[in-house]
Image: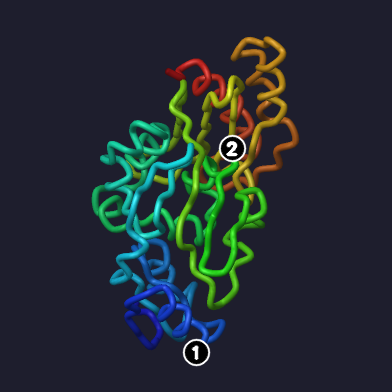
């Protein structure tokens, strides 16, 4: 299908992008990689009146490691996260996840900021942001990840607010992200992340609800000496996943337990 008509503007800075969004109002949308927005527009599930293209905004394209944190600019592409020596040294699970995102076309064009702002429950980066207590920084304020992902495709972003960077803690200990899907480039039916940080475990799940899920019960069990298998049995505690053509809610709860165990056991 063909998208509905819309205006188009290119921004050369964050300030200019915010001004354009303010002028276009609530129906204006930011265009970065476009691999989530454009397909929705083609199906007319999204019909923004205007697109503000932020690809020329070079100030949003950087990876910086400093003061125990890894700062990733919103316009950093998945492929650059995957190949970055700074990411591999300071947060290797992030590089591992970036390699799993979509196909080559998506990885070369898609951005971390776009994934965060889109807030799809099947997105991979939000799960890492949640379990690692990352911050999402905009042109106006800072959000803890737990406060940013409010519901499916829902964040507290205002119409003229732009995701500028994601700030992760350095975490280069044992880790693993396990993604279960039918075909190589599909979204995860369910995925599980495990990361050791500050002597404890951080564990989370992707696509088992409207937002990413942190498995507090699993983390607690591991801290009390439970085996990965024993701890993983707690992964489905409180989950209410929706079913779809690929998996029933019960199957997703089963996958949550199985993939959590695999992620913990495979952490290296």
Q: Is residue 63 left or right of residue 159?
A: left
Q: Position of residue 140 (x, y in %)?
A: 57, 69
Crowding near the residue tagged with mark 1, few <14, some 14–19, many ≥20 C-alpha atoms within 10 Å: few
Q: Is residue 106 left or right of residue 30?
A: left
Q: Position of residue 178 (x, y in %)?
A: 45, 30
Name the residue located 48 percent from the left edge and 31 percent from the top edge. 171
Q: Please identify the quadrant where the N terminus is shown.
A: bottom left
Q: Is residue 206 above or below residue 32?
A: above
**Could you say whether the residue bearing mark 1 is in a helix, strand or loop?**
helix
Most distant residue in the front direction = 67
Q: Is residue 101 above or below residue 136?
A: above
Q: Which residue is mark 1?
A: 23
Name the residue located 68 percent from the left edge and 30 percent from the top edge. 236
Give the mark nearest the N terminus, 1 or 2.
1
Q: Position of residue 254 (x, y in %)?
A: 61, 28
How many marks the image carries: the answer is: 2
Q: Position of residue 142 (x, y in %)?
A: 59, 59
Name the residue located 64 percent from the left edge and 32 percent from the top edge. 253
Most distant residue in the right direction = 238
Nearest to the observer: residue 61 or residue 35 = 61
Q: Is residue 116 left or right of residue 131?
A: left
Nearest to the observer: residue 24 or residue 60 = 60
Q: Are marks 1 and 2 in contact (CB under 8 Å)?
A: no
Q: Is residue 62 above or below residue 128?
A: below
Distance between mark 1 and mark 2 Cα atoms: 36 Å
Name the disc covering residue 255, or none. none
Crowding near the residue tagged with mark 2, few <14, some 14–19, many ≥20 C-alpha atoms within 10 Å: many
Nearest to the observer: residue 210 or residue 1 = 210
Q: Is residue 259 above or below residue 67?
A: above
**Could you say whether the residue bearing mark 2 is in a helix, strand or loop?**
helix
Q: Which residue is mark 2?
A: 131
Name the residue located 33 percent from the left edge and 45 percent from the top edge. 81
């Amino acid at each position: 299908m063909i998208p509905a008509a819309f205006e188009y503007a290119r921004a050369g800075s964050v300030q200019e992008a915010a001004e354009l969004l303010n002028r276009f109002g609530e129906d204006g949308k930011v265009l970065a990689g476009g691999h989530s927005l454009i397909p929705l527009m083609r199906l007319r599930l999204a019909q923004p009146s205007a697109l503000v293209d932020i690809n020329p905004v070079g100030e949003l394209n950087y990876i910086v490691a400093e003061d125990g944190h890894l700062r990733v600019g919103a316009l950093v592409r998945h492929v650059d996260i995957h190949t970055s020596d700074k990411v591999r040294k300071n947060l290797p699970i992030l590089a591992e996840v970036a390699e799993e995102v979509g196909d080559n076309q998506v990885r070369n064009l898609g951005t971390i900021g776009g994934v965060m702002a889109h807030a799809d429950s099947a997105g991979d980066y939000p799960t890492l942001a949640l379990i690692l207590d990352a911050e999402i920084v905009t042109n106006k304020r800072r959000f803890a990840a737990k406060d940013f992902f409010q519901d499916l495709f829902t964040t507290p972003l205002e119409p003229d607010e732009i995701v500028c960077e994601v700030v992760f803690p350095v975490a280069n200990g044992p880790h693993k992200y396990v993604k279960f899907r039918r075909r190589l480039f599909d979204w995860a039916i369910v995925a599980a992340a495990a990361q050791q940080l500050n002597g404890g475990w951080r564990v989370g799940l992707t696509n088992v609800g409207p937002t990413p899920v942190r498995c507090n019960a699993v983390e607690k069990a591991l801290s009390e000496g439970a085996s990965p298998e024993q701890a993983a049995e707690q992964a489905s505690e409180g989950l209410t996943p929706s079913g779809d053509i690929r998996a029933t809610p019960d199957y997703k709860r089963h996958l949550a337990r199985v993939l959590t165990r695999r992620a913990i056991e495979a952490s290296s």
